[in-house]
Amino acid sequence: MTRLDIQLQTNSASISPASDSNIEPIHRLVVLVPNADLDYAAATRRVWELAGEWGAHILFIGLCNDTLEESSLRRHLVTMTAMVQDGRASAEAKIETGSNWVAVAKRNYQMGDLIVCFEEQHAGLQQKPLTQILQSNLNIPVYLLAGLYSQKPKLAWFANVIAWSGFIGIILGFSVLQVRIIQLPSDWFQNVALILSIIPEYWLILAWNNRFE
């Protein structure tokens, strides 16, 4: 079983929230949700347990740069929000645009909030742990959850290599075919052949993409 390592971290120390009476009351959990290899079901369960322990509202926040990524992330956030909606906890979700988690945390943080992030989350050009970056830049409490990333996607890089190799192969193959078509006598047959070559190229790219979604 995957071990969960949970800590409430401040700029000065790492302490257990359940055992320290000097911690300010927590009114809201601001959960920074990555669109990555997170075990979303297990992560949602842990956040739900924390919210029930403190009687806190939950705000799930996702961060993305493009429309395709936003679609995937939105599905995760909607599912996570639905999973925790009960008598013990309430939740909402939002998506921010960009790549700066520090700016997102700063923009959404309010007094009585607790930022929740995951030990495996990294950010910045140097890919430092997100919790380290947040605590280096903001004077706010951060609750760290560990062991919630899926172990299977470690080979995702290999799948990406295969996917991109397939795309490049399809495009190069049809480019060679289309160059040969252009070398034919310039008449209606050349134009028709070019148009007909685009149809299977588009279909193959779409089919290959569907295999890796």
Image (cartoon, grey):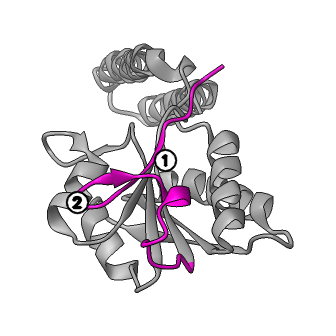
Residue farthest to the right, as pictured:
87
- Rate crowding at label 1 as few (under 14), some (14 to 19) or many (20 or more) other CA atoms within 10 Å: some
Q: Which residue is mark 2?
A: 135
Q: Overall secondary structure of the magenta stretch?
A: loop
Task: Tell me the tag on residue 13.
Answer: none
Q: Residue at x 27, y 54 (%)?
A: 13
Q: Residue at x 40, y 34 (%)?
A: 187
Q: Position of residue 179 (x, y in %)?
A: 29, 22
59 over 151 or under it: above or below: below
Residue 59 relative to residue 131: left or right = right
Q: Which residue is mark 1?
A: 35
Label 1 is placed on what type of residue? Asn
- Rate crowding at label 2 as few (under 14), some (14 to 19) or many (20 or more) other CA atoms within 10 Å: some
Instruction: Report which quarter residue 134 is drawn in.
Output: bottom left
Residue farthest to the bottom, as pictured:
111
Distance CA(mark 2)–CA(mark 1): 22 Å
Which one is nearer the viewer's eye here, 43 or 53?
A: 53
110 over 198 or under it: above or below: below
Which one is nearer the viewer's eye here, 115 or 52?
A: 52
Indicate the quadrant containing the C terminus: top left, top right, bottom left or bottom right: top right
Q: Position of residue 105 (x, y in %)?
A: 34, 70
Residue 211 relative to residue 112: left or right = right
Which one is nearer the viewer's eye here, 171 or 124?
A: 124
Q: Position of residue 87 (x, y in %)?
A: 86, 73
Instruction: Report which quarter residue 122 is drawn in.
Output: top left
Q: Nearer the viewer, mark 2 or mark 1?
A: 2
SS at badge 1:
loop
* Range covered by the magenta-colored residues: 1-27
